[in-house]
Amino acid sequence: MAAEAEYESILCVKPDVNVYRIPPRASNRAYRAADWKLDAPDWSGRMRITAKGKVAFIKLEDKVSGELFAQAPVKEYPGVAVETVSDSSRYFVLRIQDDNGRSAFIGVGFGDRGDAFDFNVALQDHFKGEDCTITLSNGVRTVPLCST
C-alpha cells in the first residue's frame, strides 16, 4: 500500500501558459486580470497538473528542459490555492509554494478559453473523485462510490 501512496498521475498538460506578477490585494475585492500587465507576461512555459494521493499539484515548467519554475499544491478546489479572477475566464491566481513552505501569489493565463476550461475541469474532476471514494478494511482498499 505504501507504493500506491507515492503514485503520481498526470491530470492535464497545457503547453502554453503565461505567468504574471500581480499587485497585492488591497481589500476583499476579487482579483482582476485587467490590473495585470497582460501584454508583457513575466514568464511563459508549460503547465502540468499532477495528483499524488488527495493533493493535486499545478506545476509550471520550462517548455524545453522541463525544469520546474513554480509549483502550487492544491488540497481543495475551489479554495485558496486557486482563485478565479472576476473579469475573465482565462486567468487565475495561484498560491505557489517552495520546499520551505514559503508562498506567493501569481497570476496565470491561457491564450485559449478551451485551455482554461480544461484546467478548471481537471481540478474539479480530481476533487470530485476524491469525494466519491470510501476506504475499506482499515485503509487496505478504496472503492469508487460514483462515476467521475
Image (cartoon, rainbow, N blue to C red):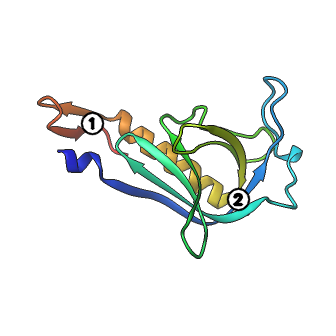
Q: Write the residue at 43% across / 45% down.
A: 126
Instruction: Determine which residue is flagged by label 1.
Output: 145
Q: Residues within 10 Å of mark 1 (few under 14, many from 20)?
A: few
Q: Which mark is residue 12?
A: none
Which residue is depicted at the point 27% across and 36% down? 145
Q: Which residue is mark 2?
A: 110
Residue shown at the point (49%, 59%) measured from the top left: 12
How far across and down, in percent of the image, does residue 8 sit? 35, 54
Q: Residue furthest top?
A: 28
Is residue 66 toward the left or the right of residue 107 in the image? Answer: left
- Identify the secondary structure beneath mark 2: loop
Q: Is residue 127 left or right of residue 63?
A: left
Number of numbered discs present? 2
Q: Quadrant of residue 29?
A: top right
Viewport quadrant of the N terminus: top left
Local crowd at mark 2 within 10 Å, few (<14), some, or many (≥20)?
A: many
User: Which x, y percent locates residue 7?
Assistant: 30, 53
Position of residue 46 measured from the top left corner of the image (x, y, whole percent): 60, 65
Compared to residue 33, the image places residue 132 above or below, namely above
Q: Secondary structure at mark 1?
A: loop
Q: Which one is earlier in the sequence, the residue at label 2 or at label 1? A: 2
> What residue is rendered at 64% in x and 60% in y?
114
Q: In the rendered structure, which amino acid carries the disc numbered 1?
A: Leu
> Depth check: 126 or 59 in front?
59
Q: State the CA–CA distance, disc 2 to disc 1.
A: 34 Å
Between circles 2 and 1, the one closer to the viewer is 2
Question: Which residue is at the front of the view, 20 or 126?
Answer: 20
> What's under tag 2, amino acid-wise?
Phe
| 87, 45: nearer the viewer | 45
